[in-house]
Amino acid sequence: MRKNHTTKKPADIALRFITYGAISITLFALIYIVGFILVSGLPHLRPSLFAFNPPLDSISITPAIISTILLILAALIIAVPLGIFAAIYLVEYAKRDNKAVKAIRLTTETLAGIPSIVYGLFGWLFFVGTLGWGQSLLSGAVTVSIMVLPLIIRTTEEALKSVPDTFREGSFGLGAGRLRTVFRIVVPSAIPGILAGVILAVGRIAGETAALLLTAGGSAPSSLFPSSVFESVRPLSVHMYLLVMEPAPGYFVESQNAAYATAVVLLITVVGINALSAFVARKLSKG
C-alpha cells in the first residue's frame, strides 16, 4: 500500500509560528499586567482604606465600591432590557432583507466603535447640561448604558441566531404562537450567550473612566450611599484616576499607594462579578 506522507508547507509553519507567538504575547501581557497590579497593590491594602467615614478619610475605597456597584446595576437595568428586546425584534420579527434592519445593524456597529470620551462629551452636553441632571449617578448610568447598548444588542443577536431553527419549527408545529416560542423556547436556549454579552458590558462599565469623569462627577461623597440619583458619585475607576492625577497636598506617596490598592480592588470586583455571572449562566443552561 502507498503511504500517505503529509508535508508541512512553509506557509503552514509560518502561520503556526505567528499564532503561537500571538498567544504567547497575549498571555505574557495579561500575566504581567495582573502580576504588576497585585504586587504593587496588595502590600498597601489596609483596613483604613475601607473606612466607613468618607468625609474624614477621602482615600477610603468603600464609598467607591458602593458607587461602582450602584452604577453597574443602574446601567444594566437600562441597557439590558433595551438591548435584548431590540435584538429579539431584529432576529425574530424583522425581515432579514429589510433596509431599515440593515441600517440599524450598521448604526449599532458604528456606535460600538466610538471612543468612550465621545459618549462622555455627549452625556455632559445633553444629560448634565440640557436636561439639568448635573454630574450625578443618573447621568453616568444613562451615558454608560448607551455606551454598552450596541455590545448587548450584537451579542444577543448572535446568541439568538445560534438557536437551531428546528426549535422554532417544533414549537410552531405544536401550536405555539411566535411570542410564546420566542420567550419559552428561543430566549431560554440563548441565555448563556446573552449573559456573555452582559458580562462584557459589566467589565466595560466597571473600567470606564473618561465618560464617568464627565457625567458622574467624582467629588468626594458625603455618605456611603448617595441620597438620590442626582447626587455625584465616585466609582473605583474615577477614584483611582483622581488619586493619581489630583493627590492631596503632602500625601503624594499615600495617594499613589492607595491608587495601587484601588486597582487591586477593582480587579477583584470585576473578576468576582464575571465569575458570578458565568456561574449563573451555567446554572441556567443546565436548567
Image: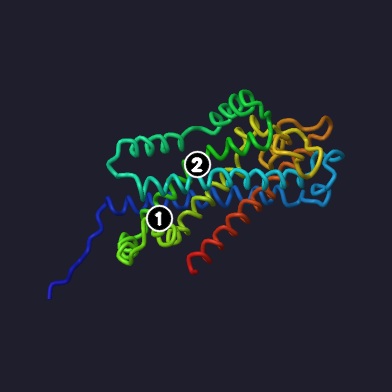
Q: Amino acid at mark 2?
A: Leu
Secondary structure type for disc 1: helix
* Image location of residue 114, percent across then percent down: 48, 33
Query: Among all residues in the image, which is located at the extreme bottom?
Result: 1
Q: Is 172 positioned to the left or the right of 143 in the image?
A: left
Q: Nearer the viewer, residue 47 or 225?
A: 225
Q: Are marks 2 and 1 in contact (CB under 8 Å)?
A: no
Residue furthest toward the left? 1
Q: Give the numbered dot on residue 149.
A: 2
Where is residue 174 shown, x and y percent of the image? 33, 67
Query: In the rendered structure, which amino acid carries the disc numbered 1?
Result: Leu
Q: Quadrant of the N terminus?
A: bottom left
Tell me which residue sits at (82%, 52%) in the image.
Answer: 47
**Residue that label 1 marks:** 179
- In this rendering, the answer to whether 247 lies above or below 24 is above
Which residue extends farthest right?
56
* Mark toward the start of the polypeptide (2 vs 1): 2
Q: Position of residue 201 (x, y in %)?
A: 54, 46
Q: Is residue 12 above or below residue 4?
A: above
